Amino acid sequence: MPTDGDLPYLFRLRQHFDVPRLDDVPGEVRRQLEMVRLGDLIEVGQTVAVAVGSRGIANLAAIVREVVRFLRQLGLKPFIVPAMGSHGGGTAEGQRALIESYGVTESQAGCPIRAGMDTILVSHTAEGIPVHFDRLASQADHVFVLNRVKPHTRFVGDIESGLMKMLLIGLGNREGAAVYHRAILDYSFAQIICSAGQEVLGRCRILGGLAIVENAYDQTARIEAVLPDQFASREPVLLDLARQWLARLPFDDVDVLLIDRIGKDISGTGLDTNVVGRKYNDHRAVDGETPRVRRICVRGLTSATCGNAIGIGIAEFCRAGLVREADLAATRLNALVANHVPAAMLPLDYETDRAMLEAALSTIGLTPPRNARLLWIADTLHLDELECSEAYLAEARRHEHLEVLTDLRPWPFNSAGNLPDNQNSSAHPDSSAHRAKNQKRP
């Protein structure tokens, strides 16, 4: 079959994930908060710092608003503190702007936002690790944290990303995040979480937390209010659910993975290493890890990442425009604080999508480019629809959870050799099609 050069033909694929979804998110927030009886733990008129992070959590603004409303009705005086480690360029202004970009504003949430990068030194762990905590949060009578529970992009354990991580890295601000990421070279993530986490829980007046689990469609699937003495026991249970519901690529072996955008709102590493099979090694899957992706190509950044291109070093190829768009200072700061230096290293860059793909396909071994196993996705959060090369067609037709949406067709390059930015727009969280689809999905 003739193709555009040596590139394979494409077909569009829809994945059907069997996952739950919450229909009334604000109602579930309130129901969960009522169950843990926070009113028994507070006095009317006390202040409470509500810690909100930098991830692109579904329904974040609505969840925060309902938490604030509930705390106010208890007679507390809530205020929001960004709990983002070094994100937002490691500045208070940057973190405030980032949280507002997610729709969490003072008028929307119904309480003040107080952003600062200063920390207090809470204590030292038994291993000698200094424990930092946001100064503004420490001045409140109580601290309430909310975060999504999900597999971490680099660390492995019974507890990964969630409430405990928010207590340490999120509320540790730039200084605390840097300390914990350095400590990982000497101690396991599990040991750091356990040791430092107990110091924070014991000394920092944590009132409770709200754990959020999302499904494969980037929708809110579960919300659970948790008291501090249950953080360590509930997170492993919720993490198991998050692993089960995680969106995945439909095939395990991939020669080239083309990604439209990476960003901090997508993943802490810009692209979710659990999805692309590079959790343990930035450039290949280790034994027993799937998927096995030979080459990653990245076209651009999300607008919400504000130029932070962390994770670009996990790709082998990218568009030159991405490099020009990137805030390299913020990217390098993030890489240094996270102690993930290779994540900020620049891949081979090309002016056009066609040139980038041709270069990548020349490096996949003896497989002719026309027969390459190639996947084209919007980002690593939105995988319900994607473009696939012809090599996958027969397998896709056999799989009961995969739906072939189109016939084979050539690449939609324009005259300059670039692909349309809206090819995967239905998967983008800002698109009306995505919102409508999420509202209708059972």
Image (tube, rainbow, N blue to C red):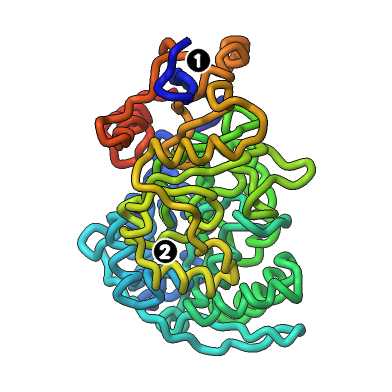
Q: CA distance from mark 1 to mark 2?
A: 38 Å
Looking at the rendered image, the quarter that the C terminus falls into is top left
Is residue 293 visible in the rendered image? The answer is yes
Q: Nearer the viewer, residue 82 or 247?
A: 247
On the image, which quarter does residue 109 sit in? bottom left
Residue type at mark 2 is: Val
- Residue annotated with mark 2: 52
Determine the residue positioned at 38% across, 72% down: 89
Q: Nearer the viewer, residue 174 or 396?
A: 396
Determine the residue positioned at 48% across, 60% down: 346
Can you tell which of label 1 and label 2 is closer to the viewer? 1
Left or right, residue 106 beside residue 335: left
- Residue 415's place in the image compared with 136, above or below, is above
Is residue 242 visible in the rendered image? The answer is no
CB under 8 Å between discs 1 and 2: no
Q: Nearer the viewer, residue 15 or 143?
A: 15
- Residue 11's place in the image compared with 226, above or below, is above
- Identify the disc placed on residue 403: 1
